[in-house]
């Protein structure tokens, strides 16, 4: 399995990959990690010598950088073939001095023969804080809107790559459960599900704990995409609201095999959940819902594939359907 993992700068891609490598090792899996950025920096430093200033690497002429990446990928072709499982990390694009540029010539992508694409995303405020203390990025003065735009482009280009090579592509939040990438790599038969629930009252401690407990249990049988792993702050801008809609509807619901709606009596049914249900329904996906019987109405009956009135009933059905626990040592 060769995974090409993309992300914009300061998404803590390195930390996420290191956690995946740790889990893989604990479960007896050998994974080779290749960072295109780190390897290119090493080659540029060797070529330019003592005068090379790492924080200014993106000032390098785009054609020269593209040539360097081409040569690097050609060298890596043989290295990738030596290993059964590989994670390759890199960018699709850079946003530097208020302009987008391609990280490398896309025609060389097929030389790496990826089996899957994963894009790591994170909360805008968190990325902004990392950038503000980064030697390379603090002088760029990126706004939240610019960070969102870059993250959106990174997802869109990676999705284009996946369509070009006819490979799956998943968008995973940085704070998602630590075993998600491991499951995607080593448990290909596991279904990817999106956990949908009204977010309006999730700030209540009791409700939050109930949802987190349910999602954790759900993760024993599925690869779960959880909207709570990347939440809006109170002071969100219009662009963040717009990307939340895009992310939950297209990036999460759109990529999942099915959505599982969890509705507690304490929650208020939201436009978000209704939109996700409708989108899943109209794209032929299965929608399973856990909802107390007294809330069940004709619209739910029309669009829901399978209705459960308690968690116990739901998980009993999951086991009866033959879903096995995904055994992962953490």
Image (spheres, rainbow, N blue to C red):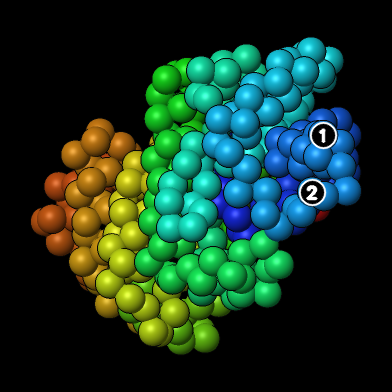
In the image, taking residue 91 as reference, residue 157 lies left or right, namely left
Query: Is 325 above or below relative to 208?
Result: above
Q: Dot 2: few (<14), some (14–19), or many (≥20) neighbours within 10 Å? A: some
Q: Nearer the viewer, residue 191 or 141?
A: 141
In percent of width and height, residue 142 lies at 48, 68
Residue 148 in picture, x, y percent from top left: 41, 60
**Does residue 313 show up?**
no
Quarter of the image with the N terminus in it: top right
Residue at the (81%, 18%) spot, across then down = 79
* Horizontal relation, residue 284 to residue 179: left or right: left
Does residue 139 appear anywhere in the picture?
Answer: yes
Q: Position of residue 266 (x, y in %)?
A: 35, 81
The answer to whether the residue labelled 2 contacts the one labelled 1, judged by CB atoms less than 8 Å apart, is yes
Q: Residue furthest left?
A: 298
Q: Relative to the observer, which residue lies in front, 95 or 199?
A: 95
Q: Residue at x 60, y 49 (%)?
A: 59
* Location of mark 1 (residue): 47
Q: Secondary structure at mark 2?
A: loop
């Amino acid at each position: 399995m060769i995974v090409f993992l993309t992300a914009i700068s300061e998404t803590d891609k390195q930390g996420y990959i290191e956690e995946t490598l740790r889990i893989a090792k604990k479960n007896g899996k050998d994974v080779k990690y290749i960072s295109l950025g780190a390897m290119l920096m090493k080659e540029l430093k060797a070529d330019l010598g003592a005068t090379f200033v790492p924080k200014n690497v993106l000032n390098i002429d785009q054609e020269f950088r593209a040539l360097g990446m081409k040569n690097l990928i050609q060298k890596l072709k043989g290295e990738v073939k030596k290993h059964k499982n590989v994670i390759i990390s890199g960018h699709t694009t850079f946003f530097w001095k208020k302009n987008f540029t391609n990280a490398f010539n896309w025609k060389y992508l097929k030389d790496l023969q990826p089996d899957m694409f994963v894009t790591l995303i994170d909360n805008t405020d968190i990325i902004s804080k990392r950038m503000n203390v980064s030697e390379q990025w603090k002088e760029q003065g990126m706004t939240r809107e610019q960070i969102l735009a870059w993250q959106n482009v990174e997802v869109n280009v990676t999705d284009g790559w996946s369509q070009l090579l006819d490979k799956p592509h998943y968008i995973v939040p940085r704070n998602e459960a630590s075993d998600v990438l491991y499951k995607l790599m080593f448990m290909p038969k596991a279904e990817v599900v999106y956990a949908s629930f009204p977010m309006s009252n999730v700030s209540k401690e009791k409700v939050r704990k109930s949802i987190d407990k349910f999602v954790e249990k759900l993760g024993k049988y599925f690869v779960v995409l959880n909207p709570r792993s990347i939440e809006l702050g109170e002071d969100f801008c219009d662009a963040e609201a717009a990307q939340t809609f895009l992310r939950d509807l297209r990036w999460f619901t759109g990529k999942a095999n099915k959505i599982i709606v969890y509705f507690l009596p304490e929650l208020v049914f939201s436009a978000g959940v209704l939109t996700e249900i409708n989108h899943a329904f109209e794209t032929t996906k299965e929608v399973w819902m856990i909802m107390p019987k007294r809330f069940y109405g004709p619209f739910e009956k029309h669009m829901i594939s399978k209705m459960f009135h308690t968690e116990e009933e739901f998980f009993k059905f999951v086991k009866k359907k033959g879903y096995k626990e995904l055994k992962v040592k953490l």
